[in-house]
Image: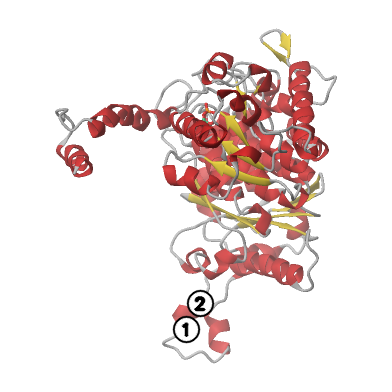
Amino acid sequence: MKNQLTESLVWKSLQSHFQELKNTSLRTLFAEDNKRGEQFSIHDLGIFFDYSKHRITTETIRLLTQLAKERGLARGIQAMFSGEKINITENRAVLHTALRAPKGSVVMADGRNVVPDVHEVLEKMSDFANHIRSGRWKGFTGKPIRNIVNIGIGGSDLGPVMAYEALKFYAQHNLIFRFVSNVDGNDFAEAVRDLDPEETLFVVSSKTFTTLETMTNARTARTWLLGKLISESAVARHFVAVSTNEKEVSSFGIDTRNMFGFWDWVGGRYSMDSAIGLSTMIAIGPENFYAMLDGFHQMDEHFRTAPFERNIPVIMGLLGIWYIDFFNARTQAVLPYDNYLKRFPAYLQQLTMESNGKHVTLDGMKTDYQTGAVYWGEPGTNGQHSFYQLIHQGTSIIPCDFIGFRTSLNLLPLHQDYLMANMIAQGEALAFGKSAEEVKKEGVPDHLAPHKVFEGNRPSSAFFMEKLTPEFLGRLIAMYEHAVYTQGVIWDINPFDQMGVELGKVLAMKIIPELQDKSKPLHHDSSTNSLIEYYRG
Ligand code: G6Q
């Protein structure tokens, strides 16, 4: 059993350090040290990570990295990479890093080197993707496939959607991609409204192949397809599966030769670079997909080997702990200044909140400290015209991650300068604000002055890269994955299960027959009963 986090000496030192630092402004910290921008930044893997606009000093970083050492982060990293069953509540290894291990390397899980298995699936995916992209794969009536509809939810949807949007620039543009996730029939209906079944391929993505939403949508898709193509044998040309459950795939009627497998050591929210990325690979092509995997792997190596003080995900994770547990920050904004990353915050919400939204330690003890924050965000500059008001002048502290690229993929005059100037300016405005004296000097009347004051002292990180390529996307995602793990180790929680999503699903299964059969007596609380009665009409 680990010692209670909050009882440790280093935690107590962080508490007193926080008391000393909490009233110091970023203005002062920058005025005291004109090299601060350089000092608190890491340039690695083509990422310029500027964390100088955080409410930290060298002492903060010293104590936080000390905390990481004492909490066994080095050991935790080694345990994850070497396939130990660190997901203790599900008795599973956590080996998403093996999904991007180069061919020829060795990663053991349960006494077996899994890298050849990973590459075998990648090759099968590549072959299939090339067939679809070239038009060689024909639908049941002999037409090539033009529409690819991914059916999946949670980890089997958010990664593929995000990656498709992020890498759309690299996609083969004569193919149409749609993503159906919600059990709400409107999702399916709108996704296929303008599609021709003869030219449509469904990729049913589900680790378990039992998920209510996905199986309902998959059955509806089959009915939709057979509505036009009539013959059951059409299913084999228009459905493929991505799953770990061969038995369920075959009982659904999908030829298991058209099944792309993965393994129980890949968690749903860590699976977008497994076969779950099949739709991504069809869109961008195998070569780009491999480049993305390489980007992931480079960040894995950085996380595994860089000293904590120079380790981007470790510093990110530690800064999160600093704000959540000492400044009482409850949310974290993710603000990509690239429209292609518009689904990145939604993807990160699952990655971070399903992983670290836990209230008990590995030993089942209730934590006496806060864990995972709420992640949210929108691409810049859209957010600036909406919720940034609260970040600048609201009453809560909201650390922000700004993500930007030097070069735009579409070189339209002026746009990129305007975009990047805004990103850089937001961090500056948040950190330094505008004082009452400065407002007064501008001739603002006294009664308006308080409304125009920006307190500043609001923290942010900037992640600046060259260009949104598949490789950079891989690095970026792995960076957040490992920041999440860093926090999980320090908080002594399990970032790899998600038991909190179960209860509501189980209760829904009980309510379904109660909605369908009006004569069933209801034994819920009075509120739930009345909601069911209202639905029954
Ligand atoms: C992610 C979760 C969850 C999962 C979905 C879909 O880590 O496990 O979001 O991905 O519930 O599950 P299936 O892939 O089994 O359909």
Other-residue count near label 2 (Cα within 10 Å), few / some / many at <14 / 14–19 / ≥20: some
Q: Residue furthest top?
A: 111
Q: Is residue 436 above or below residue 421?
A: below
Other-residue count near label 1 (Cα within 10 Å), few / some / many at <14 / 14–19 / ≥20: some
Determine if residue 428 is in view: yes
Determine which quarter of the picture holds residue 14.
top right
* Residue for badge 1: 449
Residue for point 81% across, 65% down: 411
* Residue for badge 2: 453
Question: Which image quarter is the C terminus in?
Answer: top left
Determine which quarter of the picture holds residue 156.
top right
Point out residue 38 in the picture as x, y percentages from the top left corner: 78, 57
Determine if residue 306 is in view: no
Q: Is residue 255 above or below residue 353?
A: above
Q: Is residue 342 left or right of residue 397?
A: right
Point out residue 201 in the picture as x, y percentages from the top left corner: 63, 35
Mark-to-mark CA distance, 2 and 1 = 6 Å
Q: Helix or strand or loop: what does disc 1 sit on?
A: helix
Q: Are marks 2 and 1 in contact (CB under 8 Å)?
A: yes
Front position in the image: 280 or 135: 135
Q: Is residue 418 left or right of residue 517?
A: right
Residue for point 65% across, 53% down: 341
Q: Helix or strand or loop: what does disc 2 sit on?
A: loop
Front position in the image: 9 or 493: 493
Residue type at numbered disc 2: Val
Residue for point 72% across, 33% down: 138
Front position in the image: 374 or 433: 374
Point out residue 152 in the picture as x, y percentages from the top left corner: 54, 34
Q: Count all numbered tags in the image, as a single digit.
A: 2
Point out residue 253 in the picture as x, y percentages from the top left corner: 55, 20
Q: Is residue 15 above or below residue 360?
A: below
